[in-house]
């Protein structure tokens, strides 16, 4: 099984697969079309880059969530974890007088810790990730609400707010720099390291991975640790963006990030997809939403479009995927048929 | 006597004249774009604001847009603000989901010369030019207590069912109602304060919990639209109509059946439609730089309003009861 995967990978010389390339073309077309047709979308290069501040926290969560989904799992607690990480960071800063950047690190570490709890519950007790993380999401959310109290902290120092709202030289947002570094790291980790191969292997066929001697439980748990840390980091960036924290601030993250990951070409069943695709999907969805909002479409319409994109992406992926319904089998048969003809022709 | 009548008539006529003169005072020569951003779309009280705003916008040469998030999220509102800033609206009016998260986006708007007017639920004071407060907190606290206390024993035990622990307005009202209760009904005690998360079903559950855990409670105050409906539904469900009086505030459409059934005797609110009109007057005048931070101004036939450090109080509480509730539809 893994041989066929790696074989298909190595066949393409271009670093991006067919799905990712199509997304990239869509993204470029969409940005060009929006720039010409929507007044206010591209006023200047810096204002256009500034739009990314409004959606990159979604991207940070999506990177972590991608790893979990690659293992064939799901993390529904990312929203609550984001809120919890941000609240702990803010409370440490406000009530214990801790330097804010140390509080930030503790917040991210806490995200990793709650991710570890998720992972252990899933692997040790053999719980469905969907149920386990749904349950922990309620718990983390409640803890966050209790910690936040009647008047959640706000009004952070400007040096911290810059993480969410500032830009180097007034041009490149700090958020964009942070996201770019993380994106490169994740892409290398998933495509160039043994760890990344193991994650994909576990997601593609857990049993085969186990029989070939991989410590599946440990690998799966590590994915949730990464997802938790990224969610908490995203929550902290949101805290800087709003200069305030709230227990419910992560609620909006979940659905959009799942959409992003699936649109990015990561199979919801695990084992397939690339970080590059997710990064393009973050930008595509983000600029699409910003463009639609600036064009004056209501939040209702943009939310509806997000839902429609999720449906379309899953449907198309299922049709094209080697695994799945009878339709997919049919497509594969046609594809093979075409390939056979091609090989015959080249003979 | 006859002279007196004439004098009255004359004064009335003069008053009328002066009002129209004031309405004409507002400079409406330049057409401006004003957006109204509610906490979320699809809520009847906010639609009532919108109805009033549309009527006033037509008179004030305003290009009016009503837009907001689908769920009551601050993030959704910030998205909307960002788009309004990019589209160069002249004035943004909003009622905020929470005071802190919206502030950076609104400050960005103000920096670009956009006037910001908050109404109903305020944002951080440095993130808006003017705030239109529904009613003064002490007056509303009094009305909330009276809506229940008038109908139960002076030493009764009551419960409060609010929205969320950090909801600004509800907390201010609860503070005000406690202060008033301490002086007017010193023997009355609040046995518990519960929260229904602004959701009718969760408020119903919370209401049932209150009634079952505290059978001695004879009054529930729900200073939140969903909480009031949930509490009233809980009382009706347990067959306690008449034994437990429910008061609080909500839009008349949501509570009409409970008022008619006698579960709710009276509830204070304000005229949401007229408030929407005032929001547009303030938006127009703020754009014209024709409102002082401290002082007073006239908003057409709505009358004259005082401004205190940028805060405008819209009206006294308007009490709905079985007799008058059918005159109001929102």
Image: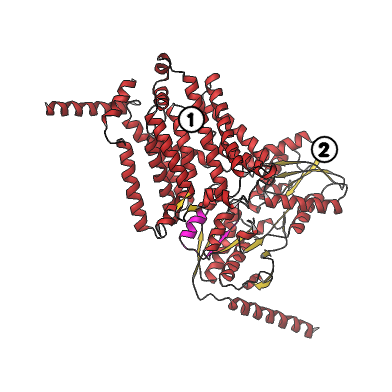
Both labels 1 and 2 in a single chain: no
Question: What kind of colouring is applied to the model shown?
Answer: secondary structure
> Percent x, y for residue B187?
88, 47
Residue pictured at 65% horizontal, 81% vertical: B17
Residue topped by disc 2: B216
Q: Quadrant of the C terminus of chain A?
A: top left
**The disc label shown at residue B169, or none:** none
**In the image, residue B227 lies at what x, y percent?**
68, 45
- State whether residue B85 is above or below residue A112: below
- Quarter assignment of residue B215: top right
Task: Identify the secondary structure beneath mark 1.
Answer: loop
Magenta stretch: give its range. B80-96
Task: Locate residue B84 relative to residue B208 in the image: left or right.
Answer: left
Q: Nearer the viewer, mark 1 or mark 2?
A: 1
| Corner quadrant of residue A278 | top left
As drawn, the residue found furthest toward the bottom would be B3
SS at circle 2 = loop
Please indicate whether residue B71 sits to the left or right of residue B266 in the image: left
* Residue found 33% across the figure and 29% down from its top: A321
Q: Position of residue B285 (x, y in %)?
A: 59, 71
| Residue on which the image places disc 1 | A74
Q: Horizontal and vertical percent for residue B18?
A: 66, 80
Q: How many marks?
A: 2
Q: Given the image, what chain letter belongs to the residue carrying mark 1?
A: A
- Could you tell me how far apart the alpha carbons at marks 1 and 2 are, in whole angstroms? 47 Å
């Amino acid at each position: 099984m893994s041989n066929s995967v790696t074989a298909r990978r190595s066949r393409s010389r271009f670093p991006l697969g067919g799905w990712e390339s199509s997304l990239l073309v869509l993204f470029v077309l969409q940005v060009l079309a929006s720039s010409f047709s929507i007044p206010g979308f591209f006023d200047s290069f810096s204002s256009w880059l500034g739009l990314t501040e409004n959606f990159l926290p979604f991207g940070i969560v999506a990177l972590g969530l991608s790893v979990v989904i690659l293992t064939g799992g799901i993390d529904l607690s990312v929203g609550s974890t984001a809120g919890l990480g941000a609240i702990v960071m803010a409370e440490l800063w406000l009530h214990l007088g801790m330097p804010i950047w140390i509080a930030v690190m503790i917040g991210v570490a806490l995200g990793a810790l709650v991710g570890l709890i998720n992972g252990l519950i899933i692997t040790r007790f053999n719980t469905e990730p969907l149920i386990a993380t749904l349950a922990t999401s309620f718990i983390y959310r409640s803890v966050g609400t209790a910690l936040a109290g009647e008047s959640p902290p706000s009004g952070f120092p400007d040096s911290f707010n810059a993480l969410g709202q500032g830009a180097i030289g007034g041009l490149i947002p700090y958020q964009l720099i942070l996201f770019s570094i993380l994106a490169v790291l994740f892409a290398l980790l998933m495509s160039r390291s043994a760890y990344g191969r193991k994650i994909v292997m576990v997601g593609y066929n857990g049993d085969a991975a186990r029989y070939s001697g991989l410590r599946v439980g440990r690998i799966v748990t590590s994915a949730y640790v990464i997802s938790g840390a990224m969610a908490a980091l995203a929550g902290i960036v949101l805290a800087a963006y709003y200069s305030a924290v709230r227990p419910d601030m992560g609620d909006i993250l979940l659905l959009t990030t799942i959409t992003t990951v699936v649109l990015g070409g990561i199979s919801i069943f695990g084992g397939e997809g690339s970080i590059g695709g997710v990064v393009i999907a973050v930008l595509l969805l983000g600029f699409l939403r910003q463009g639609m909002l600036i064009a004056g479409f209501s939040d209702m319409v943009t939310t509806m479009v997000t839902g429609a994109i999720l449906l379309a992406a899953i449907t198309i992926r299922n049709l094209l995927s080697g695994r799945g319904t009878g339709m997919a089998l049919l497509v594969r048969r046609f594809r093979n048929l075409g390939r056979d003809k091609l090989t015959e022709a080249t003979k | 006597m006859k002279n007196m009548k004439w004098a009255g008539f004359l004064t009335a006529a003069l008053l009328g004249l002066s009002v129209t003169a004031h309405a004409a005072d507002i400079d409406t020569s330049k057409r401006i774009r004003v957006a109204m951003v509610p906490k979320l779309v699809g809520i009847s009280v906010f639609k009532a604001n919108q109805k009033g705003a549309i009527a006033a916008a037509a008179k004030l040469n305003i290009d009016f847009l009503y837009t907001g998030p689908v769920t009551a999220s601050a993030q959704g509102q910030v998205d909307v603000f960002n788009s309004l800033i990019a589209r160069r609206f002249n004035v943004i009016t909003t009622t905020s989901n929470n005071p802190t998260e919206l502030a950076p986006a609104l400050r960005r708007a103000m920096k670009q010369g956009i006037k910001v007017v908050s109404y109903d639920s305020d944002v951080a004071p440095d993130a808006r030019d003017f705030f239109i407060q529904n009613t003064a907190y002490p007056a509303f606290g009094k009305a909330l207590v009276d809506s229940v206390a008038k109908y139960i024993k002076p030493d009764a035990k009551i419960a409060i069912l609010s929205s969320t622990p950090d909801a600004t307005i509800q907390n201010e009202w609860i503070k005000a109602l406690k202060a008033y209760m301490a002086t007017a009904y010193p023997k009355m005690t609040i046995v518990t304060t519960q929260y229904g998360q602004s959701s009718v079903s969760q408020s119903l559950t919370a209401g049932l919990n209150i009634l079952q855990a505290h059978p001695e409670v004879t009054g529930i105050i729900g200073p939140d639209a969903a909480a009031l409906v949930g509490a009233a539904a809980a009382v009706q469900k347990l067959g306690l109509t008449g034994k437990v009086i429910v008061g609080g505030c909500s839009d008349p459409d949501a509570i009409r059946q409970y008022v008619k059934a006698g579960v709710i005797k009276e509830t204070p609110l304000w005229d949401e439609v007229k408030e929407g009109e005032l929001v547009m007057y303030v938006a127009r005048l703020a754009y014209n730089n024709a409102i002082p931070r401290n002082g007073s101004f006239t908003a057409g036939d709505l009358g004259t309003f005082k401004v205190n450090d940028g805060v405008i109080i819209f009206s006294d509480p308007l009490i709905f009861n079985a007799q008058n509730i059918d005159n109001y539809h929102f």
